[in-house]
Image: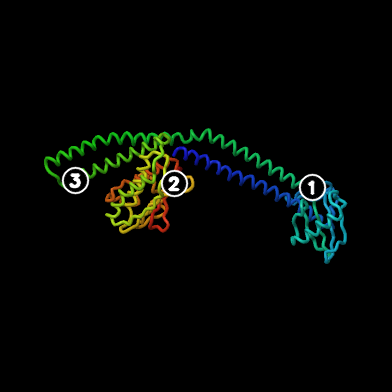
Amino acid sequence: MIKKLRIKLILVSMLSLLAVLVAIIGSINLMNIRRMISEADSVLDILAENDGRLPMQEEFTDPEAGPEYVSPEVPYESRYFFVLLDADGGVIATNIERIAAVDQQTAITYAQSALDSGSNRGFVGEYRYTIQQEGEDIRISFLDCGRRISMCRVFAFNSLWISLLGLLAVFLLMMLISGRIIKPVLDSYEKQKQFITDAGHEIKTPLAIIDADAGLIEMESGTNEWLQDIQTQVKRLTGLTNDLIYLARTEEAQNQQEMLDFPFSDMVEDLIRSFQALAIQKDRQFVSHIQPMLTLHGDEKMISQLVSILLDNAVQYSDDGGEIRVMLERQGKAVHFSVFNTVESISQQELSHLFDRFYRTDRSRNSQTGGYGIGLSIASAVVAAHKGKILASSRDGHSLLVTVILPV
């Protein structure tokens, strides 16, 4: 659990940083592109106002024009050309005096492409164009934006690499410091497990004494309802204490179990036979499909406990006259063990808490079923110890399907 918590911390931190970087770098690059287009359109507007030429003026535009300001150096550093077409698309004139990279035929081809695009402004390659109606004629002015586009590309490339390096640096830092960040949680978790183990052992002795004393009183005075209540509650407390100790030991012993190959199919069939009679007694329909000859590499005792918990859960909490289905099969490199049972009702919110300690779908916490709300927590711990997955789902809100996936 602590390892998963550390992974989630690193993952959330990296995804948060990635989202911020994408927003910041994306916004800056978008602003650069929009500024480049805006500047190009400002020059093209001047070209359109001056028959496809830039006037050579000492004060090109008023600096107080703000964003619309165009430097007086623009006529000397800009490369542009225009093509004049008639109403039928025939070429009337071309002017390529202010550009060396485009010949007359290329200029006509670009003009035809711009005309076919159906837009009054846009790009043809690295050239920004504007289409202007002059009487019955059409003037298409082009401005070379190659240098501006190249600068935008270089900036985007550099910002991308810097962001990736930043992500890598933060990832390495998170790998180094995440252990310290979750250390208080780890300490608290370890103390909690130790407390459960120690308290469990301390409680077992007085419970054993109470049970023994109640037995002696019963032998001397005979049985009565108060003695039966004491013995029943002692039995429940003893069962709960044993389950808590087992859960704590299971979580502590992860990666320390004695893993051996054992006949999984045979184990499940034996356990099913023991629960099938109880299911029939409680008026439950019990159906099973077990793929034969399946073996599993794991701790046989713990897996037996897992199967028993799921079968007992299905029998105890299924509704009257309900159905229980058990299936075991191999799928690829994993064994799938599933237990299905009908219930009166179960919500998606309840499904998300089924594997929490002491959680019971019966909010009144009625003890008639004899449960403590800890069985599925033990099942989850056993599955985690075997590097598997356990899932709970409901297709209609009136059934429960618990699926265990264990690697072979």
Q: Amino acid at mark 2?
A: Val
Residue closest to the eye, 128 or 179: 179
Mark 2 crowd level (few <14, some 14–19, many ≥20, 10 Å Cα)? many
Secondary structure under tag 1 reads loop
Mark closer to the chain start, 3 or 2: 3
* Residue 125, percent from left and from top: 76, 52
Label 3, on which residue? 228
The C terminus appears in which quarter of the rendering? Answer: top left
User: Which class describes the residues within 10 Å of circle 1: few (<14), some (14-19), or many (20+)?
Assistant: some
Looking at the rendered structure, the kind of residue marked 1 is Ser
Mark 3 vs mark 2, CA separation in Å: 44 Å
User: Quick one: which residue is furthest to the left in this view?
Assistant: 221
In the rendered view, does 8 fall on the left or right side of 55? Answer: left
Can you say whether 103 is above or below 258 in the image? below
**Which comes sooner in the sequence, label 2 or label 1?**
1
Question: The disc labelled 3 sits on which kind of residue?
Answer: Gln
According to the picture, the residue beneath numbered tag 2 turns out to be 335
